[in-house]
Structures are given as C-alpha cells and as structure tokens.
Image: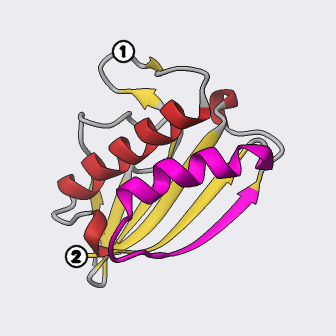
C-alpha cells in the first residue's frame, strides 16, 4: 500500500507527480528545486542559497511524511554545473552533519525552471 504525501509548506508539484510517496516503511521524496513556497519564486541565483532552500523544502516534505532528515538513507543531488559542487557541498554538510546518508551527485544538462540544484531523497518512516 502506498500513501501520497503533500504539504503546502513546500512547493507543489509542477507536473504529474507527488511531493513524496510513503510505501513499505520508506518515504520517497521527489526532487525539490529552490522555490520559496510563500512566493512561488526562486530564492536567488546563488548556489548556496538555492541549496539551502532545496533542503528546507525537503525538510518540510519529510515532516509531512512523519519523518526527518535524520532518517534519510539516500540522496541524489543534480547540479546544472559541477563547478558548483564545493559550495553546494558546504551547505549540504550543515544539514547532514550527523547520520550522513549515501549520496550521488550528477551534473544535469538542464534542471526544471533552470534551477542550479535539485535534490531528491529516500528516508525511513
């Protein structure tokens, strides 16, 4: 059995998908981009600020699913430019200072709405 997770504290889906799905004791979060849910706009053009907003959005989706960053087991980070890796990684490290999940980081040719970063994750409930 699966359950769709939604919250208005994170940006709504901009396509035919859910913010997250709970199934089998796990939460599968769709990729978040740096949209401020209160304005519907990007927080800035800077990779640091964008990464921070993406992770804040993931926190809200995880909270709506009844879990937290501490239960994240895997993330995938998509960067528009791999030269942003160091700055993204510094911000990411502040959110995952303990219980570091497994992670893959890849450069994508283009991200939704031309974001510089998108992050998805899988967590336990």
Q: Which residues are magenta?
A: 82-106
| Residue beneath the point at 78% across and 50% down | 82
Q: Is residue 70 above or below residue 113?
A: below
Given the current orientation, which residue lies at the most extreme bottom position? 24
| Residue 18, position as x, y percentages in the image | 41, 51
| Residue 64, position as x, y percentages in the image | 19, 53
Give the alpha-carbon distance from disc 1 to disc 2, as whole Å: 29 Å
54 left or right of 79?
A: left
| Residue beneath the point at 27% across and 55% down | 5
Q: Nearer the viewer, residue 107 or 100?
A: 100
Q: Is residue 100 magenta?
A: yes
| Residue 2, position as x, y percentages in the image | 30, 72
Q: What residue is pinned by disc 1?
A: 39
Using the rendered image of the protein, determine whether residue 31 is visible from the camera's viewpoint: no
Q: Secondary structure at mark 2?
A: loop
Q: Quadrant of residue 69?
A: bottom left
Q: Quadrant of residue 21?
A: bottom left
Q: Is residue 86 magenta?
A: yes
Q: Is residue 52 above or below residue 65?
A: above
| Residue beneath the point at 36% across and 50% down | 58
Q: Is residue 64 above or below residue 22?
A: above
Q: What residue is pinned by disc 2?
A: 125
- For label 2, the crowd category at 10 Å Cα-Cα, with few meaning under 14, some 14 to 19 and many 20 or more, is some
Given the current orientation, which residue lies at the most extreme right position? 109
Count every numbered label the image shows and give the total. 2
Query: Which sits earlier in the primary sequence, circle 1 or circle 2?
Result: 1
| Residue 83, position as x, y percentages in the image | 79, 45
Q: Nearer the viewer, residue 120 or 55?
A: 55
């Amino acid at each position: 059995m699966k359950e769709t997770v939604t919250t208005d504290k994170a940006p709504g889906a901009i396509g035919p998908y859910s913010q997250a799905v709970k199934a089998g004791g796990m939460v599968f979060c769709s990729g978040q981009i740096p949209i401020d849910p209160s304005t519907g706009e990007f927080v800035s053009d800077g990779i640091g600020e964008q990464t921070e907003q993406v992770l804040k959005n993931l926190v809200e989706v995880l909270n709506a699913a009844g879990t937290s960053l501490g239960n994240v087991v895997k993330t995938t980070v998509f960067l528009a430019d791999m030269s942003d890796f160091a700055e993204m990684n510094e911000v990411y490290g502040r959110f995952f200072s303990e219980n570091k999940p497994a992670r893959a980081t890849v450069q994508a040719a283009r991200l939704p709405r031309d974001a510089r970063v998108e992050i998805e994750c899988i967590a336990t409930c």
